[in-house]
């Protein structure tokens, strides 16, 4: 027998054995089995037809893998059990966020939201960075079919306080006289800047927008007598209350400017209160005495009601009648200030580490972060390392109020400091430290303290919110107490399932009634004043006001991109937007609103809010008629109620809308079915004419009813928010 025939016979026998095995397997398990596809063999089909020197077992396995094998339910159950046992544990810890838990479980955030459907957590209030309660974390892990284990907590040693603090009081022998720091306060447009302008012999007032001081100006004024006085000029506008308060807390003397023709005004009273809170003595400057309507005596009497008693009335407050515009009696005011400063015996220690206060800060395009400061102790020099708030500086340059570079700044001197890493906040305390390393330690400690305080506040808010929702959840559970647990779960799921698919960011985007704003200002104090006004916004039910970002400096490309993402508006105060930025904004459809006067900026913002409000429908009455009689008309097989009316005023126009009033209440609104005069169909019935009209067939008329003809007009709503201007 040839070798080829032998090989074919052997192949046939092997195939026959494989088929018998398959048949036996199917017969024994077919009653409780299900088909399950398996992966095909890596060998091509043609290899079975032409085997070379393959072993018997290999050929049988190939034949089996070309078919679908049967898997029993018992095998499936065993495999499922095996899979669940191989699942890993989730390491959990306290104060985990939704995002962190999802990452630890290897799930997406939607899975966490879905697991929270059956808890007392309010899904509307959750963000990816929201902190979860430990009980809820464990519940989510359990509902996901996983196990949890608590992460080992590292024992943190109590962190050493590395903050910088003021030095102890100086040795009286080291104290030397210093210039007094004088703050000029008063109502808006009462002449504060003009007074300072006359003392400095410059044109500050002419340079300011609308003649209103927009932020604190600090100047050192040299008097003809040789005396020096450091003046702080603060805004009088209502928006800048915080800046005035800041000015009084670094000052020695307050000059209260009151216009002789206006008398005591709102910001005058507020300025008096700031001075009292700071414990600073007052000098009264009654300005604009050159005007015919000036009445200085009235001003003094009005101030009595606010516990400001002038020397003329037996008090200790000096009063000087001046005209800042004409320069009258300015030297008398200066001498009164110097005399009061001598009585106060103002002295300071010019040695050792510097201490001071940030009066104003801003971002300068050429200089970077810059601050205006008053030095209160020590002498500031180039190269000094300073800390203020959560930033620090190595002093690169110092400038006086005229922009001239100076080498040193002694106590009582205003100075502009260049070299800050970031912009400090106005009002921050400035302290000199020994080195840059020490400055880093101070800033790190302050950031750490701020984070700890923020975490405590967040936990308190979260706990309060959770407690509130636990109560709501408990009430909801009591309402569903009569249902089975399956029914309760179904009801809760139906009520909340839409929240799972609606992420927090998507909720914000869907809310069209939102004005998102970006605020940029020239200096920190201006931005602060604007934000203080926006904090008073109390009309969220009409239109939500969302401050996306605020900062100092000119409008940038980043501001435009952020505004585009949130369909926002960019507001700039005393800043610029170059041509390329304006072109980019125009291309993306972003509004840039630039202003130099704060109340105009707020008015513009109110206009933007108004534009976001939906128009309201206003009914404009066109005519009114009284029902004198009622009857019905048969049309086909149906009877239609008809009212006999007389027009009392205006006209009845069939094209307009109508409403039926009975005893002052509206019982129907709609369009007329018919309007007739002497059996003729008409479109309009005028005053004094009789007519017959019909409405809906289901409406029955009564004698004495009123028929009102009206039209609806859309009227733009205005916000109820009052910023107090």
Image: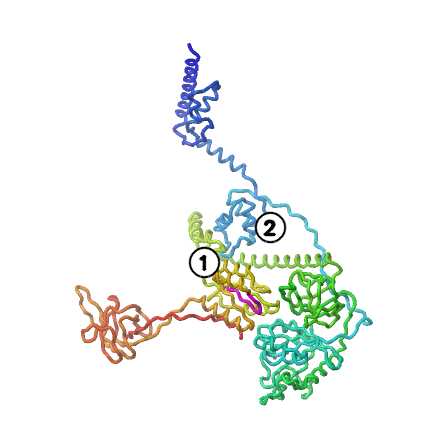
Q: Is residue 666 magenta?
A: no
Q: Quadrant of the N terminus?
A: top left
Residue at screen point 55% across, 65% down: 577
Which circle marks residue 510 in the picture? 1
Q: How many marks?
A: 2
Q: Secondary structure at mark 2?
A: loop
State the image coordinates of residue 31 (x, y, percent, origin top left).
Answer: 38, 29
Q: Nearer the viewer, mark 2 or mark 1?
A: 1
Q: CA distance from mark 2 to mark 1?
A: 33 Å
Q: How is the image coloured?
A: rainbow
Q: Position of residue 581 (x, y in %)?
A: 53, 62
Which of the two labelled residues, at mark 2 and mark 1, occupies the earlier sequence position? 2
Q: Nearer the viewer, residue 174 or 503?
A: 174
| Span shown in magenta | 569-577
Mark 2 surroundings within 10 Å by alpha-carbon count, few (fewer than 14), some (14 through 19), many (20 or more): some
Residue named by callout 2: 94
Magenta stretch: residue 573 in it? yes
């Amino acid at each position: 027998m040839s070798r080829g025939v032998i090989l074919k016979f052997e192949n046939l026998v092997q195939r026959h054995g494989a088929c018998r095995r398959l048949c036996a397997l199917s017969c024994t398990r077919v009653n409780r089995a299900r088909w399950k596809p398996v992966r095909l063999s890596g060998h091509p089909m043609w290899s079975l037809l032409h085997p070379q020197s393959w072993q018997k077992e290999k050929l049988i396995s190939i034949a089996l893998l070309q078919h679908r094998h049967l898997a029993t339910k018992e095998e499936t159950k065993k495999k499922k059990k095996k899979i669940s046992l191989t699942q890993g544990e989730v390491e959990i810890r306290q104060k985990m966020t939704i995002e962190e838990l999802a990452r630890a479980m290897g799930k997406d955030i939607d899975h966490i939201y879905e697991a929270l459907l059956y808890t007392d957590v309010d899904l509307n209030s959750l963000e990816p960075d929201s902190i979860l309660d430990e009980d809820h974390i464990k519940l989510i892990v359990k509902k996901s079919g996983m196990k949890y284990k608590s992460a080992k907590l590292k024992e943190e040693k109590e962190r050493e306080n590395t903050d910088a603090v003021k030095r102890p009081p100086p040795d009286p022998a080291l104290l030397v006289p210093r210039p007094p720091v004088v703050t000029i306060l008063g109502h808006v447009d009462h002449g504060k800047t003009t007074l300072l302008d006359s003392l400095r012999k410059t044109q500050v007032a002419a340079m300011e927008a609308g003649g209103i001081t927009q932020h604190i100006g600090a100047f050192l004024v040299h008097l003809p007598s040789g005396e020096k006085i450091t003046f702080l000029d603060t805004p009088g506008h209502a928006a800048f209350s915080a800046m005035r308060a800041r000015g009084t807390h670094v000052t020695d003397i307050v000059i209260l400017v009151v216009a002789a023709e206006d008398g005591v005004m709102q910001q005058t009273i507020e300025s008096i209160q700031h001075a009292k809170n700071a414990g600073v003595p007052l000098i009264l400057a009654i300005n604009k005495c050159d005007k015919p309507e000036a009445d200085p005596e009235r001003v003094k009497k009005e101030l009595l009601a606010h516990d400001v008693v002038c020397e003329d009335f037996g008090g200790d407050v000096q009063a000087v009648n001046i005209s800042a515009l004409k320069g009258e009696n300015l030297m008398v005011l200066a001498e009164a200030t110097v005399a009061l400063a001598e009585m106060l015996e103002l002295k300071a220690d010019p040695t050792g580490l510097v201490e001071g206060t940030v009066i104003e800060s801003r971002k300068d395009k050429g200089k970077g972060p810059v601050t205006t400061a008053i030095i209160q102790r020590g002498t500031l020099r180039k190269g000094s390392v300073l800390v203020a708030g959560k930033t620090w500086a190595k002093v690169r340059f110092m400038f006086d109020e005229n922009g001239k570079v100076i080498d040193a700044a002694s106590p009582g001197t205003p100075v502009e400091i260049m070299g800050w890493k970031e912009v400090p906040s106005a009002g921050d305390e400035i302290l000199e430290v020994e080195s840059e390393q020490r400055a880093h330690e101070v800033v790190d400690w302050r950031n750490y303290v701020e984070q700890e305080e923020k975490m405590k506040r967040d936990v308190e808010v979260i706990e309060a919110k959770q407690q509130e929702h636990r109560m709501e959840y408990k009430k909801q559970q009591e309402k569903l107490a009569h249902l089975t647990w399956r029914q309760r779960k179904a009801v809760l799921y139906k009520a909340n399932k839409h929240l799972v698919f609606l992420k927090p960011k998507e909720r914000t985007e869907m809310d069209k009634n939102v004005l998102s704003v970006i605020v940029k200002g020239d200096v920190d104090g201006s931005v602060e004043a604007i934000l203080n006004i926006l904090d008073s916004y109390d009309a969220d039910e009409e239109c939500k006001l969302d401050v996306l970002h605020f900062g100092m400096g000119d409008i940038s490309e980043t501001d435009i991109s952020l505004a585009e993402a949130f369909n926002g508006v960019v507001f700039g105060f005393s800043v610029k937007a170059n041509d390329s930025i304006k072109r980019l904004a125009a291309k993306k459809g972003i509004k840039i609103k630039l202003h130099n006067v704060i109340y105009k900026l707020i008015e513009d913002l109110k206009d933007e809010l108004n534009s976001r409000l939906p128009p309201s429908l206003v009914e404009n009455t066109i005519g009114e008629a009284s029902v004198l009689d009622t009857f019905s008309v048969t049309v086909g097989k149906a009877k239609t109620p008809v009212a006999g009316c007389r027009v009392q005023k205006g006209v009845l126009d069939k094209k307009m809308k109508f409403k039926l009033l009975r005893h002052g209440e509206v019982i129907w609104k709609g369009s007329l079915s018919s309007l007739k005069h002497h059996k003729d169909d008409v479109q309009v019935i005028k005053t004094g004419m009789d007519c017959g009209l019909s409405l809906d067939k289901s409406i029955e008329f009564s004698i004495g009813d009123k028929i009102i003809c009206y039209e609806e007009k859309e009227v733009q709503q205005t916000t109820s928010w009052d910023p107090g201007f």
